[in-house]
Image (cartoon, coloured by chain):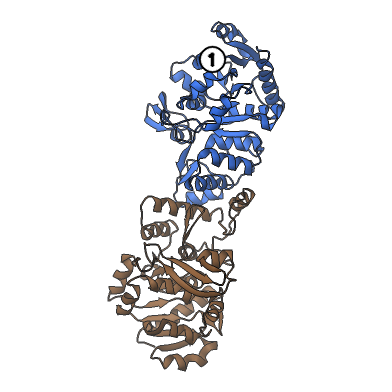
Chain colours: A brown, B blue
Amino acid sequence: MALSGGVGGAKLVAGLADVLGPDQLSVVTNTADDFTHLGLHISPDLDTVIYTLAGVADPDKGWGLADESWHFMQALARLDGETWFNLGDRDLATHILRTQMLAGGMPLGAVTAALSEKFGVGPTILPMSDDPVRTMVTTDMGELSFQQYFVREQCRPKVRRIRFEGCEAARPVPEILALLADPDLAAIVICPSNPLLSIDPILSVAGMRGALKAAAAPVIAVSPLIGGKAVKGPTAKMMQELDIPVTAAAVAAHYGDLLDGFVLDTVDAASEGEIAATGTAVSTTNTLMTSREAKQDLARHILERINPGF
Amino acid sequence: MALSGGVGGAKLVAGLADVLGPDQLSVVTNTADDFTHLGLHISPDLDTVIYTLAGVADPDKGWGLADESWHFMQALARLDGETWFNLGDRDLATHILRTQMLAGGMPLGAVTAALSEKFGVGPTILPMSDDPVRTMVTTDMGELSFQQYFVREQCRPKVRRIRFEGCEAARPVPEILALLADPDLAAIVICPSNPLLSIDPILSVAGMRGALKAAAAPVIAVSPLIGGKAVKGPTAKMMQELDIPVTAAAVAAHYGDLLDGFVLDTVDAASEGEIAATGTAVSTTNTLMTSREAKQDLARHILERINPGF
């Protein structure tokens, strides 16, 4: 099982799918970035994971479809519509179908399964919850919803606090709890996604952390930081603003006693001792996934450490 | 004031707007073809009138925008979505904005005014009602909603009966009643739209027919039939199936005592006497609007007959 946010996580998910085969992988995906825009339910991380595994993701942007056109957005702009969040013409079909299925009473998990199948995705994609959880970011310009902070304000405001609205009332989708209780589950991989914005919301869902700790399978996280920098996104900036050291060791400490193992980049090998001292098994390798082979190599490195152990 | 359905009506509306100037024209538009599709509120006739007056309508299809692209529809087809009703990428911006405004509680009249303004349309476009009225067509394959009959089944089923669901509870938008009560209103022009599918729904709205009859302004209809044939659409086929003679005189008889004047095509001049015998003033001219000048000529012909009368 993998826990993933959007682009960085989806890269490792693709590697794991290649190495394991599609029927051996389930991906628990962050839905706290979901929001309603122009009347449409948008699930950015689910779409990135689905599009990535379907091989139709835009390779450069980190969101949306490859070979996309923008005629809807151009027409919307001419009509003075809200244009701060880009919706491609082809991408719209996903949002409109998802919104229609949800309006018809289907839970998000079932909608995600239906969309995954339509896109021909092999692995099981699971939203963290059927219930709404929404990331709210308190910044120096007040509290913003995630997409206001992330897209509209381009992560510029200073972050003071992050909370996940609705997390106490939300429950993991049943398939997640069933998988975590399954003695055959081999491993739980926390992908190199933003710990604060992508993994924390998953862990915030009531009952999720307990079920992860209770699982027999080891929990192995991959550092999203390489040499104190995130490959993409505001991870480093946010950690700094929240007075967390911008290091792989701080990420490991953030996940704390949830972890059995931690994989960090070779350039951060100096931190190995610090993490190992907390009782977490550590291993270093190349974590920069610049090619399909690199994704598979990282996936293989992780899987080789599950059994017999680090 | 003009009463109009989609494409045929919109042509005369364009001619009237040219001849009168934009601030001298209000267009009462059929909304009984409206429906909810893929979660979006679609108003086909309002869009055709707005797009035509904005000069952005597709000149050939009779619906939608010129220079349209279809990437959304292609993506929807790949996801097994409903593709029997075409929605262009640019056209989608109109439907999404309208749906969002309606969901926010704006009545359809106010939404239409907002969209007209965004498209830079001068004349006042009025939906016949803020309330939902839906054309239901009883056919030899059962009762169909208008779009099922018209688009999905391509008007092939035989029509037995037409009814306008919701018409008893619907009321004309207030601006229509105010205009009809205005002593300065010069004329009410029933455009050459389908009498059964485009004009009858307008007349079915509770209070509409009475307000039209009570208006001081003369009511002048233009025949949608030329030599027993409709320029576009199923008017002739439907009249036949409903045992109405497929003649301009039958259209005049259909509108009955609502009419003060009737304009028919020169090729139907032989019917002039039959219509005049019912007490309706009659006039013949070229009603086939194949150019901007032809639209203006027909508009001018009608307007010249208001005062001093036919």
- Lateral position of residue A83 relative to residue A220, left or right: right
Q: Give neighbour class at mark 1: few <14, some 14-19, many 20+ (Cα, 10 Å).
A: many
In this orientation, does residue B178 appear?
yes
Residue B269 vs residue A115, the one in the foreground: B269
Q: Residue at x 43, y 29 (%)?
A: B167
In this orientation, does residue B61 appear?
no
- Lateral position of residue B304 relative to residue B264, left or right: right
Image quadrant occupied by the N terminus of chain A: bottom left
Q: Amino acid at mark 1?
A: Ala
Secondary structure category for the residue under label 1: helix
Q: How many numbered marks are there?
A: 1
Q: Residue at x 53, y 7 (%)?
A: B278
Quarter of the figure with residue A258: bottom left
- Lateral position of residue B52 relative to residue A238, left or right: right
Residue A222 position within the rendered picture, expressed as x and y whole percent measured from the top left: 46, 80
Residue A44 vs residue B96, the one in the foreground: B96
Q: Which residue is mark 1?
A: B252
